[in-house]
Amino acid sequence: MERTADRMSRESGSSSPRILLGVTGGIGAYKSPELVRRLVERGAEVQVVMTRGAGQFVTATTLQAVSSRRVRDDLWDAGAEAAMGHIELARWADLVVVAPATAHFMGSFAGGLAGDLLSTLCLATTAPVVLVPAMNRVMWEHAAVQANRAVLEGRGVRLLGPVEGDQACGEHGMGRMMEPVEIARELLEGRVVAGRLEPQRLKGVKAVITAGPTREPIDPVRYITNRSSGKMGYAIAEAARDAGADVVLVSGPVSLRVPGGVRRVDVETAEQMYGAVHREIHDTELFIACAAVSDYRPHRASARKIKRSDEEIKVDLVRSKDTLSSVAALAHRPFCVGFAAETEDLDRHARDKLANKGLDMIAANRVGPDCGFDAETNALKVFWPGGEAEFGERAKSVLARQLVELVAERYHAARETPRTSLLAG
């Protein structure tokens, strides 16, 4: 079956994706003109459809100015509906995006109601539908809203966000609408491209992903840590979420935004990470250990700040618990992916770690003063029993998507092949 975007592009002589942007009555509607602008500057044609409530937050005049198209807001528009305008719009769109999507709209859409032009279009279109939720954090967490979310996702509707942050009501939490530049990037450069939704290779898979450094206390103000920024792990968590996984992110101390739809568990020490992972692992099908966990920790942390006195002090170190090895050794273990950050002999050290820990895959990268930690880019070599792949230097977000795609491929192969034969190479 040909893609709608391809068909529309041939008929119009244009390669521009046609996006029907629905705006509903939430405070997040103040971001909609900016979203239109971001989409248009990336080459999209945008037709705005407003609900009656949206007009309480943003005007049709503003949206018309930035989209260069007359805004539609009435199912009973005599001029447009004389030619069945709502059907025409439904067929015109390569992609339908509702931003913001309120709790009311999600409930109406899940219930198959068609009480206004926007909800009618969403039911009448054959184009992919993407919702960008925005609401108070308590509303988002309500069982009814989550049930509607599950129904919609089960029907193939994709959600972007919400994200955690400050809300118009003065509270802080999950429910904030993604920023327009992020939405535009996801729609036209990320998981949704010109009306095509990327296949969700990990749909319904529970994935536990670790990220960031750990801190091992020496005294109340000092600790041993490493240079990990957590950026790679967070990018992998976002990519796994986009691939359909139910993601739990066990994170060391970092200053990064939690990807929307990802549940984060905060830890500080290697021992805390070990405990948090094992509390989550019992029903997990995929484990990706990207965190830079301290291999050693002080044998005994001082209860008081160590004063500057002697010329030398000694800190006795002991081995930290090995979270990755312990998960890989479980009787009913998930598919295990490890990471190896190396300064030399990358291939040899990675292959040794793959074999010694009994992993399904390992992703290795070189680290040093000029690469790896703290950088926006990375490069990976990936090994598994009987195979390998290499990804050259690129943005960590791009690299994460490519890695997750490969992980999904190997994960499904492992489910079809006895584990003993996979480990035998």
Image: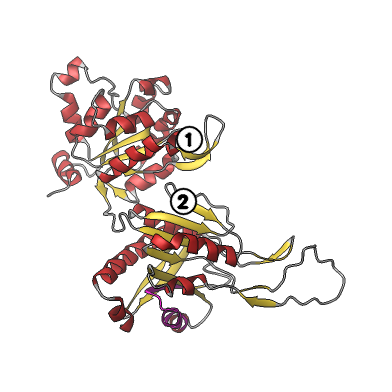
Q: Residues within 10 Å of mark 2 (few under 14, many from 20)?
A: some
> Where residue 253 sits: x, y (%)?
59, 57
The residue under the point 41% across, 43% down is 161
Disc 1: which residue: 138
* One can see residue 374 in this view: no
| Mark 1 / mark 2, whichever is N-terminal | 1
Query: Compared to 169, does 40 lie above or below?
Result: below
365 in the magenta segment? no
Residue 237 image position (x, y, % from top left): 43, 57
Q: What residue appears at the point 26 percent right and 70 percent down from the top-left corner?
A: 413
Horizontally, residue 368 falls left or right of residue 380, namely: right
Q: Magenta region: which residues?
A: 349-364
State which quadrant residue 410 falls in: bottom left
Q: Are marks 1 and 2 in contact (CB under 8 Å)?
A: no
The dot on residue 263 is 2
Q: In this rendering, would 372 be left or right of 151? A: right
Q: In the orientation shown, which residue stands out farthest toward the top?
A: 78
Out of 188 and 411, give the one closest to the viewer.
Answer: 411
Name the kind of residue labelled 2 in the image: Arg
